[in-house]
Each structure stands twice: as C-alpha cells, then as structure tokens.
Amino acid sequence: MLLSKLVCERTKEAPQDARITSHILLSRAGFIKQVAAGIYSLTPPAQRMSQKIQNIIREEMNAIDGQEVLFPVVMPREMWEESGRYTSIGQEMVRFKDRTGHDMLLGMTHEEAAVHMARHIVSSYNQLPCMIYQIQTKFRDEARSRGGLIRVREFTMKDAYSFHVSQEDLDKYYQRAYEAYYRIFKRIGLKNFTDFKSDTGMMGGSVAHEFMLVTPAGEDTLVFCDGCDYRANMEVAECKREELPRVEETLELVDTGSAATIEEVCALLKTQAKRSVKAVVYAVRGDASKIVVAFVRGDLEVNEAKLKKAVKMDVVPYDGGVTEEIACGNIGPVGLSDKIIKVFDLSLKGATGMVTGANKPQYHYKGFDTARDLPGVEFTDIAKVAAGDVCPVCGGRLRLENGIEIGNIFQLGTKYTAAMNMTVHAEDGSSFNPIMGCYGIGVGRAIASVAEESNDEKGLILPVTVAPWQVYLCVLRPDKEEVRAAADKIYADMERAGIEVLLDDRDCAAGIKFADADLMGMPIRVVVSPRTLEAEEAEVKLRRGGEAERVKISRLIGHIKDTISRLTEEINGSL
Amino acid sequence: MLLSKLVCERTKEAPQDARITSHILLSRAGFIKQVAAGIYSLTPPAQRMSQKIQNIIREEMNAIDGQEVLFPVVMPREMWEESGRYTSIGQEMVRFKDRTGHDMLLGMTHEEAAVHMARHIVSSYNQLPCMIYQIQTKFRDEARSRGGLIRVREFTMKDAYSFHVSQEDLDKYYQRAYEAYYRIFKRIGLKNFTDFKSDTGMMGGSVAHEFMLVTPAGEDTLVFCDGCDYRANMEVAECKREELPRVEETLELVDTGSAATIEEVCALLKTQAKRSVKAVVYAVRGDASKIVVAFVRGDLEVNEAKLKKAVKMDVVPYDGGVTEEIACGNIGPVGLSDKIIKVFDLSLKGATGMVTGANKPQYHYKGFDTARDLPGVEFTDIAKVAAGDVCPVCGGRLRLENGIEIGNIFQLGTKYTAAMNMTVHAEDGSSFNPIMGCYGIGVGRAIASVAEESNDEKGLILPVTVAPWQVYLCVLRPDKEEVRAAADKIYADMERAGIEVLLDDRDCAAGIKFADADLMGMPIRVVVSPRTLEAEEAEVKLRRGGEAERVKISRLIGHIKDTISRLTEEINGSL
C-alpha cells in the first residue's frame, strides 16, 4: 500500500474528549473516525487490524470445534419474548417498529438466536457437544459511551454458544474455551491480562470468567492479593474482616441533634466509624415503591453487584420521594418498617457496641448488639473490598488495580434452552434441555486494548501479529529518480515475498515520515535514502526500540522475513 | 468437518412460502433458517459459502486499488440530513430514537458515511483517485421480502465508493470496476449473466449498470434483441413503434353507453385497440392531490420507471377518492382539467383516427388526431416494450426474459460531495468537489443466485470456488471398524493436504447419504465402502454428473487435488 493514497490522516491533535491513550493514539494515527457518540468508522489500517484479530479468533474457535454461522442484527420481539429478555433488558436494547408495525430490536447478544438456530437442528444427544459462533455487528445503547473503541454503542463481536448433555461435559468444554481465550489474547499481542471469576449478571447461569487487561485506563476495579494467587473483580471480591473486640453495652437512645453523617455522629458520640452501622437505601428498578436498605459497617461501602445478587433483584440508589417508612432519616435496623427489605452485611455479624440510626429525627441508638437486638437475622457479604484489606485465602494484603474487560465466558445452564423449549433426545430415549455456555470477545475493544498497552510517547507499537502492515518502508528523497526506483523495487520484492508493507512514498521531510512511522506503529521500519543506497544498504529498526541496523539490500528480504518470524515467535512461542 | 456434528438439518419439505428453486433448495439443504420476514440466520455451510464469496470480492476490490474500511450500521440523522436523503428516502429506511431521544437510522447504503470518512482525509488531488469499500450488514425494510435470500430485509453487502478529479478519471475507473464485476461473478461460478445500462433511481447520478443473472426466477424483466447485441432492463428498454397508416377523420363525440374497457369500446366502435388512447391515472407519492395521467396507445402498457423519470417525481397508481377532475370516467386528452399533469407517449405522436375518452360518462371521441386536436403537445417514451417489438438498433425482434440483479455500479457525479461539502485542492490551487462512483454486490443474493442457476432435481450443484466444502466423503458401513478406520485416514489425509472435506460419518443407509450429498451439492463425492476397500479403492463422482470413477486409495489425494484444480480452472480459466 502506498501511504500517499491511504485513506488515513495523521494529526497532531486528538479529539477533545479523548482521555485515554488508546483513544488518543488511534485517533491521531487516523485509524478511527467518530460518526456519533459511541459509533465509529474504521479506516483501512484499523480494518486490517480488525481482520487480523478476527482471523486469530476464528482459528482458535475452529480449533475447539466451533462452527461459524451468522445471526441477524435485527430480530423480532417474539424471539426475545420466549426468553423473557424483551422486557427484562432495559434501554440499552434498541427497539423499533418496522413498516408493518411489528416490534423489532437490535441484537446486543445472541443467545436467543443461537437457540432458535439449534433447537430443531440439534435433536439428538450424539450431536452434542456442539458450538456455533459468529463475528458480527452488535448495538448496545450505552448511556455513557467513552474512551474511543473501549466503550462504544456499535461494535464487532465474536459470540459463541455451546450446547451440552451434562454439566460435566460443559465443564470440560468450558475449560477448552478458557484456554482458547488465553491463546487468542496472547496471539494478538496482549501481555498483562488475566482471568477473573465473575458475576453472571443479565446472562443468567452460575460460573463465569472475565478476561481483563490490567491497565490504569480500565473502568473495572480488580482485586489482587500480594501474598497468593487470589484475584477477583471488585463485584465479587471478598476479604477477611478483622473482628472488633466485644463490648458489653446496653441499647440506649441518644439525642444526636443535627449530626447527620456517620463522621458527625461518631465524633459526637466519641466512637469510630467502624463501631457504627451504615444504612444505604435502594429502590427496586421499575418499582420505586419497593425499598431495600443495605446495612454495612460504618467504615465500609456497599457493593451493589453483591447486593443485587443477595436480593435477586436489580436495585438502583434510591432517589424517589420520601416514603412513610424512610421519612424519618437516621435509618437504623431497630424498629424499621417490615415493608422494607433489609440486607445485613457479614461485617455486622456479632458486632457489639454499635451506633445506629433510630428511625426518628435527631436520635440514634448506641450500644447496639446485632446478636442480642436483632436475633435470627441473616448476614450476607454485600460490602466492597478496599486496598489493604485481608486476603480471604492467605491472609495477605489486597491491592486494587484497574482493568479493561477483553472477553468473557459464561456457564448458562438451561436458562435459555428451557425457556425456549429446546429439547434433545437422550441416549435412554428421554429428552432434556441442553446445558449452554457462551463466550464473547469484542474485536474493537481488542484493537483498543492492544493500543492501550503497546505504545510510547511517540505513538503506537503494534504487535507483528495484528499490525496492519508488518513493515513501514520510508523513502527519503523520492524525488531522486534512482532512490524512488530502488524503493519501488524493494517494495515490489517485499510484496512478492508476502511481506505486508506500507510504502511512505510522499515527497516530504524525513522528520514527518519518521513521526508518522512512530505514530502508526508498524513493528519494523525500513529506511531507504541516498546515503544508505550509496552503500547498497537499507536501515532497519524495530518500532519497539533498539539499535537501527544497516542491512545489504541483497539480503534485505531474507532479513525482514527472519525478523517477522522472530517477532511472531516471541508472541506465539509460549503457546 | 463431521456431518454428524454439523449444525445443519436437511429436510424433505421446503417452507410453505418457498416458490423459487434457490429458496427451496437452500432451505431443504439446511443452509438458511428464517428468523422473521426477510431476515435469516446462515448455518455453517451458508456462512462458509458467504465467506468464500466475500474473499473473491475482496481480492477483486483490492486488485482495483480498493481499501477496505468499516462504516457503522447505525448512523445519526444529521449525516443523512446533509445529503437530503433523511427525508427523501421512504419507509424502507428504519429510523429510531436512541435512549437520549436522538434520531438514528439503519444504513441501507453508505454514500454519506463514505463522504464523511473521506472528506477531511482526502484533501489533495494527488490522493485521487481512491476507492474505499466495506463488506457489512445492511437493513432495508422491504415491503415485500420474498424468495429466501433473493429479496431480504437484512443482508450482507459489499459497497464501494470511489472519488475522482474528473469525469474522465471516473470513466476510466468505472471501466475497471465493470471488469472486476465480470471477474467476480465468473469466479463465484455464475454463468448466464450480463450487464445492462440502468436507471440511477434514488442514488442520483447519470450512468449506471446493473449486472443481471438471467433466470426465470428473476423479478426484473430484461429485454434482449435476437438480431443484435441490444439489451436493456425493462425500466429503460426502448423499441421502434410501427407507424399506423394515416386516416382522415373528424373528431366526433359518440355515445358508448356502458362500454368501459378499451376492448369493449373498440369492439363497439369496430376498431382495434391500437387505434385508441389508453389513459392511466397516477398520484404523486406523498401528495395524493397531485394527479398525473399517462396516455399511451391502447395496445401498450405504461412503464412506470420511464413515467417517473419523465415527470421527475415518484408516482404511484392512483387509488385515492374520486376528485373533481377525474370523476367522470372515460378519461381522454381533450378537455381534461389543466390541474392534471399529462404525459403523452411517443406512440401517440402523429396518431390519427383514434378513440379516446371524452371525460364524461357514456361518451368517447372517435377520429382523434393528436397533431390536429392537441397542437404543441410533447411526446415522451413512457411505454413498456413487449415481446416481439422491434429492436431500436437493428430492427430485429425483441425477446423478454427474467433476471435477478446481482450487482450494480453507478456514476454518482458530485451529488454527495457537493451536498456534504467535500472539497479537494486541485493542482492549480483551486478546490473542487470530487466526482464519485459507487459499486454494490449483495453477498446473500450471490449465494441465492448460484443456487438458482446451479441445481438439478436432486439438489444444489455448487461451483468448486464457493462450495462450503470441496469434497463430500461418504462412508458406507462406518459401523465396521476397518471401514471407519480407512475413512478416518482418508479424511485426515485430505485435511492435511488442504482439501476441504465434509465427512458423512453417520451410521445410516447409503441412500440417505447419497440423497444428502446430492441435496447439499458439494462438487466432488467420494465413497468409501467395504466393497471399494476390498480393491483398495474409493469411488469418485462429480456432483454435476458423469461417470463414477474407481480410484486407488494410494493416489486418491492427488486425484482429488487434480480434480479440484480442473474444476477451478474451468471456472477461472477464461479470466
């Protein structure tokens, strides 16, 4: 490809809203072009990168017996009514009426379409296990798209769905998919990534893992133990809580006047926040009259993901009008209306000498003893882990990092096959709903993740396995006929040898060319200039750094091929 | 791939609404599965076929310097306001509001997105010509989707957009694209196809060609001359009309009583239909009060495409209430309200002795002479060509056939670059709007076209260049261990040799296997059975017919590779 003709414009400035490195660099290198909030066009370099990533994914999916299919982007309401998700999924799913008034939607995931395809075709146990996957456009109407390709509304995704006779068979297949995911992320050149057990959220099911690139730009919080292998997404991370020394106090109503925050009340009563009970009020989504109050120790925060799991409902921070039950302020567990759903964190189990709200203005209790004053109550882990908390496995200290989710795998159980009535004949003649797994990777986010991890102050440093071109061939002084001729010959020889090369044939200053080469990030830069040609040489330099080498033009092709092999081997070697 | 695990179910019955061969066979072979009206999932064989077609398209687009990009499926209203098409395109474009209330749409073509991408990147004449293309999902809310993959609502399409400094440069590139299209359709195995100059419709611009597969299943009517190379889509086809002998009659009002149709009136007045004037009433779309009356000779039909072009408005057959102007019935050119737009076909030029409506109940005129009674009127070609009409070029006879549109190419002019303000610096320092071309091929329709053309009563006969697998390997009696082992070895050897093979490993009757092999249409069938193995042989047969051959297993791989090369050469050889 000639750079002079490439539909891709490099710029000094990034878009004003670009905050994170990948967004800045992919924009500045001209790889992406925004069309609307969270909606991008990919220019040729990004599309080439996307296809290389897709091919790696395809190879690994085929290697675990995946069969590629294509599901529609637009689906009818009826199919999603069958699973119950037409109503359970919120505004992030786009719904519209077609010209005949029929309710349609844009797919943001394809469990329904997968079961729809498989449910008559796969009718016997001996067709199982099987896995179908697609690489296709999805649309998710994110409220807060951000970060360039990191969190978009329209994206290309590989989504895979497997069907099994038994949990045991799913477990076996799930492990193969898990390993395939490691290979995929390694092969596209990601380095600092790992997997986490995760919450299954709206997908249903039980076991799930998400694969995370560890990077400050991530919007997920990850919990690691410095002492052992324990790691978890904040949503499900646990820790060991230190038990506070037992104190014997009687429950006593105290006037706390205008003291409102935990800090103010504890200061007034001369106690620590961890000797208080924090009450956080939530409403059930879609039913603002259903109130949930989460109680945690005063020094902790509520983990909403855990809370939702505990109450098995989707809850949102309460912001409705004041209802009778919580009109009083100073909410506390003693005497709170029975109409309210109450959830108590594990940190309150056996707690004594606590300050709590008294459910009336200006008053708190002190000396609260959970076992004594709320006998029979159950405790659930609904609190957030914090940096420095104690590892639940080894007792070491926990550390927090940020991460970008680069993929996820779920065990779905029979949620969809049962709801959509997919039955398969068993060996004994009975019939059953197959157990499903599903497996997703966002291709655009993979591009952004690579960019986020592999760069320096000058631009992208793309892994050779996914770079749009392997070689950036710079011609200095292409206005000189013999230089241009030599460069054209090298370019033609490279193409013939199967080397992917971008020829910077522009008649401009060397500095501009080197800056663009650095910004665009092809792994190998080759420079041909009057000076190198005098010695019948070219200059070869790796984008990631190291010394420039002079290589005789007669052995340049072999040298570049060896370099590509070496760089590829460095990425794939450990697989 | 093992057939026992393939997610693809063959059936005896086609869907009830399947009328045409490709719909019936692609359904029965299990290649497609309907999700909603005009919306299909592709199972693994169809997806493999789709990818092979995409790769052929990609190679040919790259060969004419195309750069692959990706535009979004979902686009914002603003982009389409710029071109004016947000309002000019009707219900076939899906519009919806996103969660913030923003107007969005689903792309059914991407001229706007192409200009949006190119307009800042391509800023200098020396970046031209350039062509960008994508292969991506489109949605067009067709009122009457039908014919399986022939006319759908959601489809995968290759759409390409080129930019040029001059009409001359576009002409040159357009010719390259035209030739690339021939190569593409040949390479995917289509045989009876040709190109037609066509109307540019909603795309704007002037010159356009459509590529048509000639087949009875087509919904387009094509006009061919048996005597010369003249050919045209019915929408624009012309012919030479025989002139009727001049007769001298006076204009006379006659009572025709209840005679209503042209046949009845002509019978009553003892004349031929071609001595009458037919009046067909249309309304302008979106403005039912604007009436257009098309006058053609009584033996001819109105060509709506020509009529629309003549009046430069979109018209639909009039079905509104009776308005004052056309309340009378028996509509004729003499005395018809001035409020009505009247269009006269060329066949009426110089016509004499004609019967026409008199614009009042029970009365017609006879002896109408267009030149005498309607002086100064203009005549335009708005009539349909019929079989047996006279070729406008050589005077031979015209013949009608049906066709499926398999691709189209358009010269767009500066319609989009001017409307969307894309300017480029010229060599002389001035700036200009580049001239565009656009080039489309539907991938799903290509699959259906191949199926429509290549089949027999037993099923599909797929060209080797696009067949999901090259070989259908039948094992008879796989329950016998030594047979299964031999088949497994052949299967493994084939895969190692790069032969794409579907192994029918099912333990079922030979008849079922042969029927499925015929239905699915892989080009080469190989049978391994106890009997062939006794002689250390396999049986090889081409799906398209001819004798089965016995081939020694020791040279089977070589034989199959040679056969694949030969079949490929037969398709590609003439390129």
Image: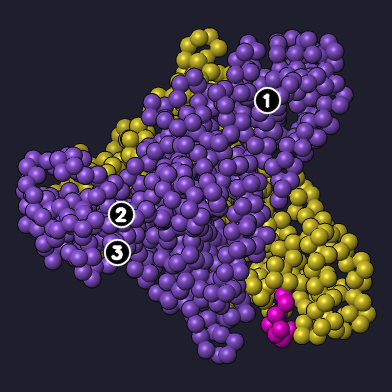
Chain colours: A yellow, B purple
The disc label shown at residue B379, or none = 3
Tag nearer the camera, 2 or 1: 2
Q: For residue B174: magenta?
A: no
Tell me which label, 2 or 3, sits earlier in the chain: 2
Helix, strand or loop for disc 1: loop
**Where A163 sits versus A424, above or below?**
below
Is residue A309 shown to the viewer in this render? no
Q: Residue B178 at what x, y percent from top left? A: 59, 59
Q: Tell me the CA gap for discs 2 and 1.
A: 57 Å
A486 displayed left or right of A392: right
Identified at 17% across, 56% down, the residue is B249
Q: In this rendering, would A319 be left or right of B426?
A: left
Check disc 1 and give the amino acid type. Answer: Gly
Badge 3 amino acid: Phe
**How far across and down, in percent of the image, does residue A240 sit?**
51, 45
Mark 2 or mark 1: name the one nearer the start of the chain: 2
Q: CA–CA distance between discs 2 and 3?
A: 19 Å
Residue B184 spot, x, y in % from top left: 62, 50
Say whether mark 3 and mark 1 are on the same chain: yes
Q: Is residue B106 left or right of residue B71?
A: left
From where the camera sits, is residue A520 visible? Answer: yes
Amino acid, disc 2:
Pro
Q: Pointer 2: residues within 10 angstroms few (<14), some, or many (20+)?
A: few
Q: Residue furthest front?
A: B248
Give the magenta part as a residue range: A504-513
From the image, tell me which residue sits under label 2.
B245
Please say if the residues under marks 1 and 3 sit with CB atoms less than 8 Å apart: no
Chain of the residue on which disc 1 is drawn: B
In the rendering, which numbered label is found on residue B545? 1
Q: Nearer the viewer, residue B539 or B344?
A: B344
